[in-house]
Amino acid sequence: MKHCIKQAWVAWLLMPVLFSCATYNSKMSAYYKQVSASHYRHADHMLERNGYLQHPRNSLLYYMERGQMLHLQGLYDSSNLFLNLADLYIENKHKSLGNAITSLMLNPMTVPYLGEDFERFMVHYYKALNYLYLGKTDDALVEARRISLSTQTQEDKFKPGANRYTKDAFALNVQGMIYEAAGMINDAFIAYRNAADVYLKEPNNRYYGVAIPSQLKQDVLRTAALMGFNDQLDFYGKKFNTTYKSRDSSNAGGELVVFFERGMAPAKTEQNFILAQSGDGNGVFVFNGPYGTFDIPFDVSSANSSAASLKNFRTIRVAIPIYEPRSYNNVQGTITADGAAYSSELAEDINTIAPAVLKERIVKEVSNALLRQAFKLGMEKGASEATKAAVKNNSKEKDAGKKERNAEAAALVTGLVVNMFNTATEKADTRNWQSLPAYIQYVRVPLKKGTNDIRLQLGNAEKTIRIEGKTGLQLYNWRVPDNSITVAP
C-alpha cells in the first residue's frame, strides 16, 4: 500500500513536467509582441526558428503567419508561396482517424489546426492583393472565383436560412473590386450586389459588427448603371434609400481603394467551466458561461463505453476556448488626394466575427468536451478494474481479505494516477491566426492621370504614398503601426 501511494505522489510531482499548462498564446507571445510592434522582419525570423509552430499539427498556422509576415515586408511572391500552402492545406482537410482519437483522449490541440472559417477568406484577400501588386491580374481573378467556391463551401455547412456565418461580406466586396480592377464590370456588379444582399438581410443592415458601407451602395448602383441594368439601379436605389451619384469623368487616372488595417485579431484563451446535471436523469448537462445558459443533451452511448456513464456524476469540468477581443479606440482613417479629403468606412471587424462565430458553435464545443470527459472517465475506471484483477491474479498472499484489500488499494492508486493524467491533459484549443488585423476600413478615391501623392492618416499615424494614375481601379493596403496611434482628447 505504501509503495502504491509513493508511486502516486511521484506521478503527481512529475505532472507539471509531463504536461505543460501553456496555451498557444503564451507559447507565441514573444512573436506576437514583435508583430504588434510592427517588427515584421524580426517576427518572420522568429517564425523560421519556431519549432512549435512548424510541428505538423500547426502547419496551417505556420503557413498563414509566414504568408502574413512576408506580405507585410512587401515580399509578395514569397508571401503567396506560403498562403498557397495554407490554401492547399485547408482544401485537403488534413485530418485522420488517429488524430481524432488522440483529440478524444487528450485535447484538441494535439490534432492538426484546420483554421477558423473567417481565416479562410482572409487567405483569399491577401493572396489577391499579392497577385495584383505583382501585376498578375489573371491569378487575382482566380482568387476572386475561389471566394465564390469558399462561400459555397461555407453555406453548405449549415441548413438553408440558418442564422450562422455563411458568407463573408467583406470577401464578396473585395471580389467585386478584383473583377473591377480586371475590367469585368458585369462580374463586379454581381459580387457587389451579393455583398450588399448579405447586409440587407440583417437587422439594421449590420453584419457581424459592420454597417453596410455607403461606398458599397454606390458601387452596386454605379456598376448597374455601367451595365445598363436600369431595373437593378432602380431596385437597389430604393433598397438603399439613395441615388447613384455619378462621379466627374475627368478623373482620367482611374480610382484607388485604400484598406486601413489596424490592430491584431483577438486571442483565444482557455476557461474551465463546471457543467451540472439538469436533474431530470436524462444525461442533460447545463452550461452557464459567457455565451449564455443552455442545456447540453449528451448521449452516453456515443462515448462507446458503458463504464463512462456520466449519469454517475453530478458535475463535470470542461475546458472551453474563449476569445478575448483586444481594445482599440475608434479612429476613422482619412485620405487627402489632389486637395480633397476622404473618410474611410469599416469593412471587416474580426474583433466581432471571431467571438461571434465561436459562440455559434459553442454547443458543439461543449458537447465535444463532454465526450472527451466521458472517454477519460471510462479509461480511468477501466484501468482501475484491470489493475485490481491483475493484482489479485498475481498475488501470492494466502489471506483472502488482505489480498482483496491490496487489490483495492492498487486499483485506487491506478485510478488516481489516470485521473491526474486526464486532468492535466484537459485543455481547450486556443490556436488562431492572431496577426490578422482586428479591423479593416476602406475608402475609394479618384486619381488624376500621372503622379498622385496621397496622404493617409489614422489617428496620428500617417503615411504618404505615390500612385501612378491610370485607367481602372487599383488597390492598396496599409497595416497601420498600432503603437503609433493616439487620439487627441
Image (cartoon, helix red, strand yellow):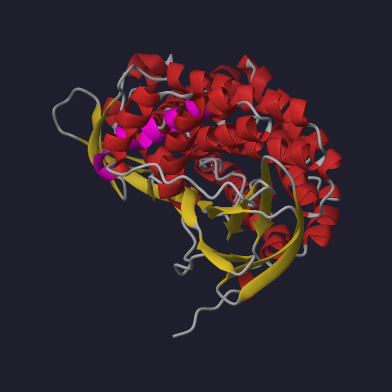
- From the top left corner, tell me how far across and down residue 137 is, in percent: 75, 31
Nearer the observer, 429 or 476? 476
- From the top left corner, tell me how far across and down residue 296 is, in percent: 28, 30
Nearer the observer, 457 or 326? 457
Vertical arrangement, residue 207 with respect to residue 35, above or below: above
Nearer the observer, 119 or 360? 119
- The quarter of the picture where the C terminus appears is bottom left
Q: Is residue 202 visible?
A: yes
Q: Main secondary structure of the magenta part?
A: helix
Where, by quadrant of the figure, is residue 220 drawn?
Answer: top left
Vertical arrangement, residue 482 with respect to residue 243, above or below: below
Magenta stretch containing residue 198, yes or no?
yes
Residue 205 shown left or right of residue 418 in the figure = left
Residue 72 shown left or right of residue 185 in the figure = right
Nearer the observer, 466 or 131? 466
Q: Residue furthest left?
A: 280
Residue 398 shown left or right of residue 201 in the figure = right
**Segment colored magenta:** 189-204
